[in-house]
Image (cartoon, rainbow, N blue to C red):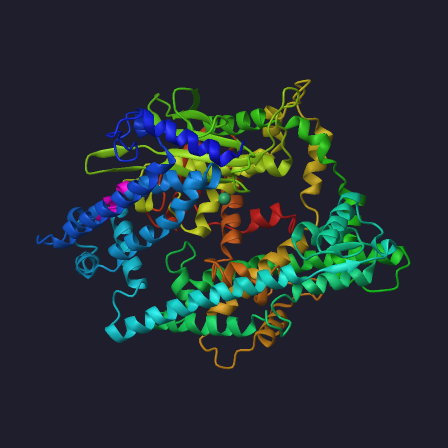
C-alpha cells in the first residue's frame, strides 16, 4: 500500500480517538522530569499552531517590554528579550531537529510556513526602535549600572545585533542599507546557482578503456552508470569530490588528469554564462559599503569584532605563522614525489594535477594502513564507552542510561548526565544510525536550552546525531577512525552544551563564535586517538583483545601523510578570504589579477591551488564564512594548545579537567573568550602544538 495513504489513515484514526479539546503538547509545560520533550504526544499537525502561538506570545512580550515606562534596567529590558521567544524557541528546537532526522510530509509543508514566521519574529524584535532606545541607554552606561560580567556580555551582544542591523542609521542610510542587503541576497543566490549549474554541466566522457587504467573497479562501474544515465557511450566523470578525487588519485593518463583538474579549478571562471567574477566584485563592493555605513573601515573589521580573534590582523598573523611552516613542508612532499617520477623514468616535472596521483603512491609506500584491520576494534559501543570514560574521569561527571524518556524514533537512546554529587546536569540523546529521513553528516543540537535567571533554572537536553551503519544480529556497528573521531567530536559539543552554567541563553553553552566553538569538539578527538586511551576502550568486538601496538603505530604514521599539501591549500584559502575582505577600495578590482598578486605575495607554490578559488568559494560568497574561513584553523590552534596542557599535566588529570570544565565548558561566551582561555591554560594559545600535530615541526 502507498505509504502516504497509510499515514493519512493513521492520522485520521488518531484524530477521531482524541477529544476536541486535546491539548497541544507543544503549548503546555512538559510533565516529564526536567522539562524533557514529550515526543510520544507530539503529532506533526501540532507544530503550525504552536509556531503561530509562539509568534503571538513573542509580539505580546515585546510590546510589553517596549511600553515599559520605568527607567531601563537589565531586568526590565534585557531579560524580557531573553525570554520573549521562550515558546517559539522551544517549538523551533524540536521542529528543526526533527526536520533533519525524522520528518514527514506534514512537517515539510509546515516548514515552508514556519520560515516567514521566524523572519517576522526576528524583525519584530530587532527593528523595534523603542526597545533599542532603552538598550542604548543601558549600553552607554554599561560600566556604571552594577552589571555582572555575564550581563555585560549579553548587553553587548544585543547592542551589536541592533547596530549591525542598522539601528543607528538615519532614514536615508537605512533605505540604502536595505537595498544593499537585498542585492547581496540576489548575488549570493546567483553565485551558488552558477556554481551548481557549471559543476553539473561538466562531464568528461571517455570511450577508450585503455585511457582509464589504474582506476578502481567501483569507480569504473559508477562512471559507466553515469554515462548510461546521460545517454553517452563508455564512461562519464564529473567534478563532484567522490568522483573527482579518486580520478586524480588513480587515473594513469596524465592528460585526462589535467583536464579533470582544470575543469574543477576553473569553475565560475570560464567567461561563459556561469562566470562569477563580476558577482564577486559587486559583492565585495557592497560588503565594503555596508561596513562603511556601519562605521567600520573594512568588511573584515565588521565581521571579526565579536569573534575571539577580534581583529582581521590577529587572524591574519596566526595564518601567516602556520603558513611559514606549511610551505616548506609541502615543498618536501613535492620533492619526494618528484623522486618517484624520476625513478619511474617519467621525464617531467610534477604538476598540480599530478599531486594526488603521486601522493597516493607515496602513501602506499610509506604509510599503508588497511582500515578494515582497524574497524573491529572500534565498535560504536566501545567508542561511546571510551568517550564517556574520558569525560567522567576528567570532569567528575557520570552518564547513566535512562529508559523512561519518550523518543522520536525507536533507535534513539537516552542518558542522564549527573554531577559528582548526583545532581542532574542534562539529558543526552544519541541518534546514531542512518535512515531515509535523516540528512547526511553528524551534528549536535539541543531540544531544551539552559538558563538560570528570574527564579527559573532550566537544564538542557542535548542530542548527538550521526549516520552510522545499522547493526545486524551478527555484526555490531563498527566505526572507521574518521567515524570514531566524529563520535568524540560531537560528544565534545555535547559536553559544552551539557555542562554549561550560564544564566542567559544568549551566551549559554555552544552559543559562542565560530573560531571558538570548535575547540571544545576538536579537543575531544585528541583523546580518541591517543594510544594510552585507545588501549582503554578499543577492544576487538569478538575477542575482547585491546588494539595491538603495531596498528596504533601505523595509525600514527599515517596521520602525518600529505599534511604540507593539506595545510597549504587550507591556510591559503583562509588567507585569500581574509585578503578579499581587508581591502578598502574595489574600484579597480580584477579577481584573477588579485588572486595572482596574493599568490605571489604569499609565495604559493605552483603545484598547489587554494582549496577554493574565488569563483567557486561558496563558504565566503554564498555562506556566512566570509572573513571567517580562518575559524577552522584558529580553533585548531586552540584545541591543540589546550590538549597540550593535558599532555603536560596528565591525559586524565582531573585537576586539569576541572579547570577546563570551570573556565571553558561551563562558561559559554559569558566572558571575554581569550580571558577564559588564559584562566584555563595560564597563557595565550601558542601555535606550536598545532604545528607539531600536523607534522610541520618536530
Ligand atoms: Zn563541530
In this orientation, does residue 318 appear?
Answer: yes
Question: Quadrant location of residue 244?
Answer: bottom right
Q: From the viewer's perspective, is 62 left or right of 607? A: left
| Residue 238 percent coordinates (x, y) | 69, 56
Whether residue 170 is in magenta: the answer is no
Where 254 falls versus 63 (above or below)? below
Region rendered in magenta: 81-87
Which residue corresponds to the image point at 30% horizontal and 35% vertical from the top-left? Answer: 26
Which residue corresponds to the image point at 18% horizontal and 51% vertical from the top-left? Answer: 77
Magenta stretch, main secondary structure class: helix
Outermost residue on the left side: it is 69
Which residue corresponds to the image point at 61% horizontal and 27% vertical from the top-left? Answer: 477
Q: From the viewer's perspective, is 135 left or right of 550? A: left
Where 649 falls versus 675 (above or below)? above
| Residue 185 percent coordinates (x, y) | 43, 65
Nearer the observer, 212 or 510: 212
Nearer the observer, 86 or 427: 86
**Quadrant, the N terminus:** top right
In this orientation, does residue 248 appear?
Answer: no
Question: Quadrant location of residue 251?
Answer: bottom right
Amino acid at each position: 500500500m502507498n505509504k502516504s495513504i497509510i499515514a493519512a489513515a493513521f492520522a485520521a484514526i488518531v484524530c477521531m480517538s482524541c477529544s476536541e479539546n486535546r491539548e497541544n503538547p507543544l503549548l503546555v509545560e512538559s510533565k516529564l522530569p526536567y522539562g524533557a520533550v514529550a515526543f510520544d504526544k507530539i503529532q506533526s499537525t501540532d507544530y503550525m499552531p504552536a509556531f503561530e502561538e509562539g509568534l503571538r506570545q513573542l509580539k505580546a512580550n515585546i510590546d510589553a517590554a517596549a511600553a515599559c515606562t520605568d527607567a531601563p534596567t537589565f531586568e526590565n529590558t534585557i531579560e524580557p528579550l531573553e525570554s520573549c521567544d521562550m515558546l517559539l524557541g522551544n517549538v523551533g528546537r524540536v521542529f528543526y531537529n526533527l526536520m533533519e532526522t525524522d520528518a514527514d510530509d506534514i512537517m515539510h509543508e509546515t516548514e515552508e510556513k514556519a520560515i516567514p514566521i521566524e523572519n517576522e519574529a526576528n524583525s519584530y524584535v530587532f527593528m523595534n526602535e523603542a526597545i533599542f532606545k532603552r538598550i542604548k541607554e543601558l549600553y552607554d552606561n554599561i560600566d556604571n549600572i552594577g552589571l555582572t560580567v555575564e550581563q555585560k556580555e549579553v548587553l553587548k551582544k544585543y547592542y551589536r545585533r541592533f547596530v549591525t542591523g542598522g539601528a543607528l542609521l538615519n532614514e536615508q542610510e537605512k533605505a540604502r542599507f536595505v537595498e544593499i542587503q537585498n542585492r547581496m541576497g540576489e548575488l549570493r543566490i546567483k553565485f551558488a546557482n552558477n556554481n551548481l549549474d557549471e559543476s553539473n554541466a561538466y562531464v568528461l566522457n571517455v570511450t577508450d578503456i585503455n585511457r582509464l587504467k589504474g582506476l578502481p573497479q567501483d569507480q569504473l562501474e559508477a562512471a559507466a552508470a553515469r554515462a548510461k544515465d546521460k545517454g553517452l557511450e563508455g564512461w562519464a566523470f564529473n567534478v563532484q569530490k567522490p568522483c573527482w578525487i579518486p580520478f586524480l588519485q588513480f587515473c594513469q593518463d596524465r592528460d585526462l588528469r589535467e583536464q579533470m583538474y582544470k575543469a574543477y579549478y576553473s569553475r565560475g571562471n570560464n567567461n561563459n554564462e556561469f562566470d562569477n567574477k563580476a558577482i564577486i566584485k559587486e559583492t565585495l563592493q557592497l560588503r565594503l559599503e555596508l561596513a562603511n555605513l556601519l562605521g567600520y573601515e573594512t568588511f573584515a573589521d565588521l565581521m571579526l569584532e565579536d569573534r575571539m580573534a577580534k581583529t582581521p590582523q590577529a587572524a591574519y598573523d596566526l595564518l601567516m605563522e602556520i603558513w611559514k611552516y606549511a610551505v616548506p613542508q609541502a615543498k618536501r612532499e613535492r620533492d619526494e614525489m618528484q623522486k618517484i617520477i624520476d625513478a619511474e623514468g617519467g621525464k617531467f616535472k610534477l604538476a598540480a594535477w599530478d599531486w594526488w596521483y603521486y601522493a597516493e603512491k607515496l602513501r602506499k609506500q610509506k604509510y599503508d594502513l588497511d582500515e578494515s584491520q582497524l574497524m573491529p576494534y572500534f565498535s560504536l559501543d566501545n567508542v561511546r564507552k571510551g568517550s564517556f570514560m574520558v569525560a567522567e574521569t576528567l570532569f567528575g561527571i557520570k552518564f547513566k542510561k535512562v529508559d523512561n524518556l519518550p523518543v522520536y524514533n525507536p533507535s534513539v537512546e537516552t542518558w542522564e548526565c549527573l554531577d559528582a554529587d548526583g545532581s542532574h546536569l542534562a539529558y543526552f540523546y544519541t541518534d546514531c544510525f542512518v535512515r531515509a529521513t535523516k540528512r547526511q553528516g553528524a551534528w549536535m543540537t539541543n531540544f531544551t536550552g539552559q538558563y538560570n535567571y528570574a527564579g527559573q533554572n532550566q537544564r538542557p537536553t542535548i542530542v548527538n546525531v550521526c549516520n552510522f551503519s545499522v547493526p545486524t544480529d551478527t555484526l555490531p556497528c563498527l566505526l572507521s577512525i574518521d567515524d570514531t573521531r566524529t563520535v568524540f567530536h560531537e560528544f565534545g559539543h555535547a559536553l559544552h552544551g551539557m555542562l554549561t552554567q550560564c544564566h542567559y541563553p544568549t551566551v549559554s553553552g555552544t552559543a559562542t563564535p565560530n573560531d571558538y566553538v570548535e575547540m571544545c569538539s576538536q579537543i575531544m578527538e585528541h583523546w580518541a586517538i591517543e594510544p594510552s586511551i585507545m588501549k582503554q576502550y578499543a577492544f576487538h568486538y569478538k575477542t575482547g583483545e585491546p588494539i595491538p601496538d603495531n596498528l596504533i603505530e601505523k595509525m600514527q604514521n599515517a596521520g602525518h601523510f600529505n599534511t604540507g599539501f593539506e595545510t597549504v591549500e587550507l591556510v591559503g584559502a583562509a588567507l585569500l578570504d581574509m585578503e578579499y575582505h581587508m581591502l578598502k577600495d574595489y574600484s579597480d578590482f580584477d579577481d584573477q589579477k588579485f588572486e595572482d598578486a596574493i599568490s605571489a605575495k604569499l609565495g604559493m607554490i605552483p603545484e598547489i591551488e587554494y582549496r577554493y578559488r574565488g569563483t567557486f568559494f561558496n563558504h565566503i560568497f554564498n555562506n556566512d564564512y566570509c572573513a571567517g574561513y580562518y575559524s577552522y584553523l584558529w580553533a585548531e590552534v586552540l584545541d591543540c594548545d589546550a590538549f597540550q596542557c593535558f599532555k603536560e599535566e596528565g591525559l586524565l588529570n582531573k585537576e586539569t579537567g576541572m579547570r577546563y570544565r570551570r573556565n571553558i565548558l561551563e562558561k559559554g561566551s559569558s566572558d571575554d573568550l581569550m580571558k577564559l582561555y588564559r584562566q584555563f591554560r595560564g597563557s595565550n594559545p601558542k601555535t606550536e602544538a598545532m604545528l607539531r600535530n600536523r607534522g610541520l615541526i618536530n
